[in-house]
């Protein structure tokens, strides 16, 4: 004898729901990975539309496609030596809310010496060397960070912040105020300064000695006291008249980089720490006047302070696209164009700095 009885579904456990079968169209888990992949795919297409071809080869995911797309573009667009002396690592970061191109720091940095080249250019024409230097310095304002002598004073000592001139007396006044003392209205006695020297370091006279008295290199200089500097127009005129000069190729690169700076009106890669309360850490290279020991000491202090602050990010430039507000195709193409422009300026800076000598550990100067 048999009894036909219809099976009855087991009751779900309290607090749970029971699905007897999952359709293939139902995702196994819920996440925004698909949307992020879509954004990266749209960015790859946008980059291709502005001259960064899609990569050749086989890839397992869209992240590899984007990475190789830009790696192959850089390899074809620039020489193998273009970034050797100005090292950093570009990274593409995607979250649910933003797409960012981040220039992360490299630990192996070259140390360039300005003095031999600037002085040689000045012997060719007044203001030519300082024009080239001004172009290098301006690169920092366009997110191509460099550790240079202008950073030494605020990296080493807070007392330089309140000084209105680069003198030992101004430094002594700043120190005395910090100590709760009232400095005299007139000149500070030499005996007082000598006594303070026993307790405090990094006096302006010592720092100026490192740059042969060029105050503008350490950030202290009235505009009227800055050395004569050629304009780009004057530099172009010199180049036309001295095309066969040994320094002509370097001056031509400086003019090209200066023009690239002027086109970068938005400064898209400038780090905005307010996005995440972060502080940058790192640079493309060191740019010393001559002997870099003081600069290296300053950077060591600076990086230790940054690490101790807890908000340091080992990167110094980024361009971020808010996908909720600016995630359209034109926005993605603009991000790609800004990235191409950044790489072009970066390569020009590396090419320009390659004309300057690199300081080695065994240098005596």
Image: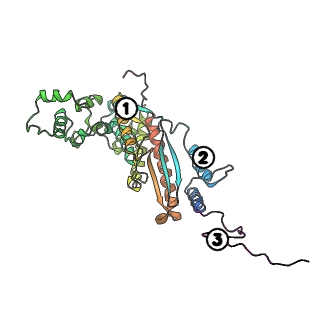
In the image, which disc is placed on residue 296? Answer: 1
Name the mark nearer the viewer: 2 or 3.
Answer: 3
In the image, which disc is placed on residue 342? Answer: none
Q: Which residues are magenta?
A: 5-31
Q: Nearer the viewer, residue 107 or 254?
A: 107
Q: Earlier in the sequence, mark 2 or mark 3?
A: 3
The residue shown at (48%, 50%) is 341
Q: Earlier in the sequence, mark 1 or mark 3?
A: 3
**Extreme-right residue of the structure:** 1
Q: Is residue 45 above or below residue 190?
A: below
* Residue 63 shows up from this direction: yes
Q: CA distance from mark 1 to mark 3?
A: 63 Å
Res. 298 image quadrant: top left
Q: Is residue 57 above or below residue 3?
A: above
Q: Position of residue 142 (x, y in %)?
A: 40, 48
SS for callout 1: helix
SS for callout 2: helix
Q: CA distance from mark 2 to mark 1?
A: 35 Å
Q: CA distance from mark 2 to mark 3?
A: 50 Å
Q: Earlier in the sequence, mark 2 or mark 1?
A: 2
Proximity of marks 2 and 1: CB atoms separated by less than 8 Å? no
Q: Which residue is disc 2 drawn over? A: 72
Proximity of marks 1 and 3: CB atoms separated by less than 8 Å? no
Name the mark nearer the viewer: 1 or 3.
Answer: 3
The residue shown at (38%, 20%) is 364
Q: Nearer the viewer, residue 194 or 353?
A: 194
The N terminus sits in image quarter: bottom right
* Residue 238 shows up from this direction: no
Q: Nearer the viewer, residue 157 or 362?
A: 157
Whether 288 is among the magenta residues is no
Q: Residues within 10 Å of mark 1 (few under 14, many from 20)?
A: some
Q: Which residue is disc 3 drawn over? A: 17
């Amino acid at each position: 004898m048999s009894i036909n009885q219809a099976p009855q579904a087991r009751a779900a456990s309290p607090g749970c729901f029971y699905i007897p079968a999952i359709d293939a169209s139902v995702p196994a888990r819920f996440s925004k990975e698909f949307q992020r992949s879509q954004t990266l795919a749209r960015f790859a297409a946008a980059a291709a539309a502005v001259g960064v071809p899609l990569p050749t080869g086989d890839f397992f995911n869209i992240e590899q496609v984007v990475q190789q797309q830009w790696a192959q573009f850089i390899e074809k667009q620039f020489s193998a030596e273009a970034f050797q002396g100005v090292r950093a690592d570009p990274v593409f970061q995607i979250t649910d809310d933003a797409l960012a191109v981040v220039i992360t720091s490299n630990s192996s940095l070259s140390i360039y010496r300005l003095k031999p080249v600037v002085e040689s250019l000045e012997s060719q024409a007044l203001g030519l060397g300082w024009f080239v230097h001004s172009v290098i310095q301006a690169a920092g304002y366009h997110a191509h960070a460099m550790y240079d002598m202008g950073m030494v004073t605020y990296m080493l000592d807070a007392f330089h912040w309140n000084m209105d001139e680069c003198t030992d007396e101004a430094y002594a006044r700043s120190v005395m105020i910090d100590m709760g003392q009232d400095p005299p209205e007139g000149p500070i006695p030499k005996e007082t300064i000598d006594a303070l020297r026993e307790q405090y370091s990094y006096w302006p006279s010592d720092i100026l000695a490192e740059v042969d008295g060029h105050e503008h290199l350490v950030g202290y200089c009235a505009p009227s006291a800055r050395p004569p500097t050629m304009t780009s127009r004057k530099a172009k005129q010199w180049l036309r008249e001295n095309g066969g000069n040994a320094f002509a190729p370097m001056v031509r690169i400086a003019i090209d980089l200066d023009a690239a700076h002027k086109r970068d009106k938005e400064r898209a890669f400038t780090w905005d720490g307010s996005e995440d309360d972060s502080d940058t850490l790192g640079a493309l290279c060191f740019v010393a006047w001559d002997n870099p020991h003081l600069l290296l000491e300053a950077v060591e202090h600076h990086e230790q302070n940054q690490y101790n602050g807890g908000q340091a990010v080992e990167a110094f430039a980024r361009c971020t696209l808010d996908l909720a507000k600016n995630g359209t195709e034109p926005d993605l193409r603009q991000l790609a164009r800004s990235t191409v422009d950044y790489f072009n300026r970066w390569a020009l800076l590396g090419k320009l700095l390659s004309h300057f000598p690199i300081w080695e550990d065994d240098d005596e100067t």
